[in-house]
Amino acid sequence: MEFGIKPLGRERFWLWILLVPTLFGLVFSAFGSLLATIALSFAHWDLLGSPAWAGVENYIALFTDAKFLKSLANTAVFSVMYVPGVVIISLLVAVLLNRKLRGIGVFRTAFYLPAVTSAVATALVWNMIYGKDTGILNYVLELFHLAPVCWLCTSHAMLSVVIVNIWGAIGEGMIIFLAGLTAIPNEYYEAATVDGAGGLRKFFQITLPLITPSIFFQVLLSTINAFQAYDYIYMLTRQGQGDSNIPVVVFSIYRNAWNFGNYGGASAQAIELTVIVAVLMLLYFWLEKRFVFYE
Amino acid sequence: MKKIAFSLLMVAVLLLTACGAKTASGGPVQLSFMMWGDPAELTVWNQIVKDFEAANPNITVSVEVSDWDSYWTKLKTLLAAKTPPDMFAIDAPLYLDYQSKGVLLNLQPYLDKNPGMLDGLYPQTLQAYQTPQGYFGLPRDFQTIVLFYNKTMFDKAGMAYPTADWTWDDLRAAAKKLTLTGSDGKTTQYGFSFDMWDMEPGYSEAIWSYGGSILNADHTKTLLGEPAARQAWQLLYDMTFVDKSVPDSTASGQYGGDTFLAGVSAMTPLGHWVVPGYADAKLNFDAAPMPKGPAGRFTSVNSAGFVIAKGSKHPAQAFTFLQFVLSTAGQTRLAELGFACPVLKSIAESPTFLNQKIAINQQVFLDSLQYANIKPVFKGYDEWASAVGDGMAPVWSGEADLNKTLDEVVVAADAVLAKNK
């Protein structure tokens, strides 16, 4: 598929002029720091002295550092719960909100609100929800005569944090799915109605196949977000000396770089994170060819 | 990720701007001073700067205050970019991490030129900054840990306030009596609370009082798992989980961490930095000495200090500023701030400090020096403190066994020490 109009002659000149600020920013901030990260991953550096050549030591540490391996496992568990959660729930929300109802805008806004609210502020609210004695969630559990749960203790923190992250991501997922849903021609549904298909049948036979491009895109985005998840985890599970009881990879990178003066190790971890995400993306694009249906 | 990208961007920007910086020679000198703190502190520091500039018309000082976390990130970025502020604040336990990397100016030559400059300072506050090569930093104020108590809660229970005769057993008994439960069986008031993750206002005092130590003398071994230390841990653990007179970490988290500030705990060991906040919260409180243990009475002393960056282009002028902060005029202003104790003895023992607007027993902060141990200063402090403080977290949330966790924590902490040899 090709989009847009091809620039011709003098337009091409202006095209580049207009792109320069963006390209400049990309080259000097994104690519610059990417290259610096690669270089630093082969060095020992605490930011204060001069970097010293480390060879592949930082990369060996990726396989021997128990704390990093734990954070890698945490990120994997987080992603396995988070990605399907976001995709399924935001698709359901989008389907429910894809109708002509009075005040539908209010509902859509309500679901999108977390996306535009500061993570720090919402994390504080969730802290109150998850509180052991004074939390709203445990209050509800007690109404049903269930035992209170320590939501942010090590035993439950992962689940609690995944819930908050999914909650925070539904809004954006919903927007993507709503766009996909409105693109499905109404005629299909009308024809199905004539043939006597029910709501569920329409969803599985028409909506789902036609929305696979949106699902693919959302799975892709959610995976990247899952591997970069940090803010809610930092706010909800940070302990007294700055560690988390469920440290994820980005948390480990931050701690190593800024708290432990291990900039080289942190860079190697960042590279590994990038490689993992890149490999997953390749896998996704391979799957796309087989399962995604473009009209 | 955003934070890291931002930091890297900052490094790049600073590198670029650094190329444009000019070196000044002669004429008026502009100094920069960076510190952590809150806005109230900035106001006072600007006042100190004003006094200083009046006395030194050729020097101007710009003060920048950040919160604790961003302060260290910003500072490290500036140091990495070789554009550090001329002077910056340092916490004694982190001092050696910076000093050993060679980014601090040796103040010894300047001190030698000003004999007697340090004579009026409390020696306990200077000790942390001494190195075999001399001083690379100086204390600006100090903190001793004392026992804060909520007078209203004691009055309501008809109990006498804590005294200097108290032992840890007395404290435990009082904490039990001060713990109240509501009709639904939930605790509405705790007798005692402490920062479980930090040695300074938490476990170090108890361990020393029971005859234990934090580390060995050359900082190669963590001694938190030795029998005497375990006695202290057990006491704190039993108060939390047997007596239930101390909120566990999940309970205190609901009140934003400081249950004393929230008005739900009756006693807590902390330093002078909480006094303005407690007064703002309209608490009716006072301070008493830390209790005695089988091995005697101990508390912890720590000092915030300041240093001059090795890269400073105006070290002599920067030293003049340090000198001014440690002078009677500077220390008087700091005492008025009420966040810490002045390091200059004559000011600490003067009405400026002892009769502050917030009328509590200020003398006890000074008397505590007599039985205070210095908060240990060693390389790799941050990582060690995390290995211990965060390693013990499952114990304080009630999820892990005390002695088993201590065994693991000591191994992890020793690994950090070995790495930072």
Image (cartoon, coloured by chain):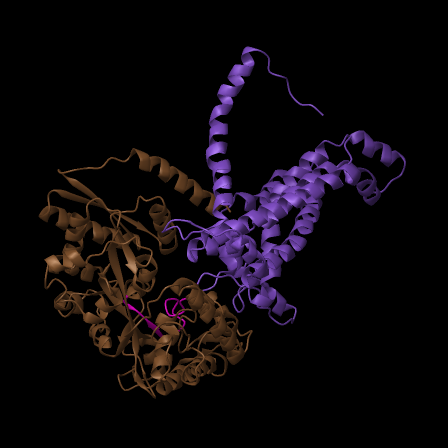
Chain colours: A purple, B brown
The image quarter containing residue B380 is bottom left
**Which region shows up in magenta?**
B256-272
Nearer-the-camera pick, B285 or B28:
B28
The image quarter containing residue B357 is bottom left
Q: Is residue B70 left or right of residue A3?
A: left
| Magenta segment includes B166 | no
Q: Is residue B418 left or right of residue B362?
A: right
Question: In the rendered image, is residue A170 in sight?
Answer: no
Q: How many marks?
A: 0
Question: In the rendered image, is residue A74 in sight?
Answer: yes
Nearer-the-camera pick, B168 or B27:
B27
> Magenta residues: mostly which secondary structure?
loop
Q: Is residue B366 above or below residue B13?
A: below
The image quarter containing residue B329 is bottom left
The image position of residue B169, as x and y in percent, is 37, 87
The image position of residue A14, as x and y in percent, is 51, 16
Nearer-the-camera pick, B364 or A148:
B364
The image position of residue B175, as x and y in percent, is 39, 81
Q: Is residue B103 above or below residue A240?
A: above
Q: Residue furthest top?
A: A9
Q: Is residue A247 left or right of residue B370?
A: right
Q: Is residue B381 above or below residue A254?
A: below
At horizontal 45% and vertical 55% (from top left) the residue drawn is A262
Q: In what quadrant of the picture does the C terminus of chain B appear?
A: bottom left
| Magenta segment includes B265 | yes
Q: Is residue B5 above or below residue B225?
A: above
The image position of residue B363, as x and y in percent, is 20, 74
Nearer-the-camera pick, B137 or A196:
B137
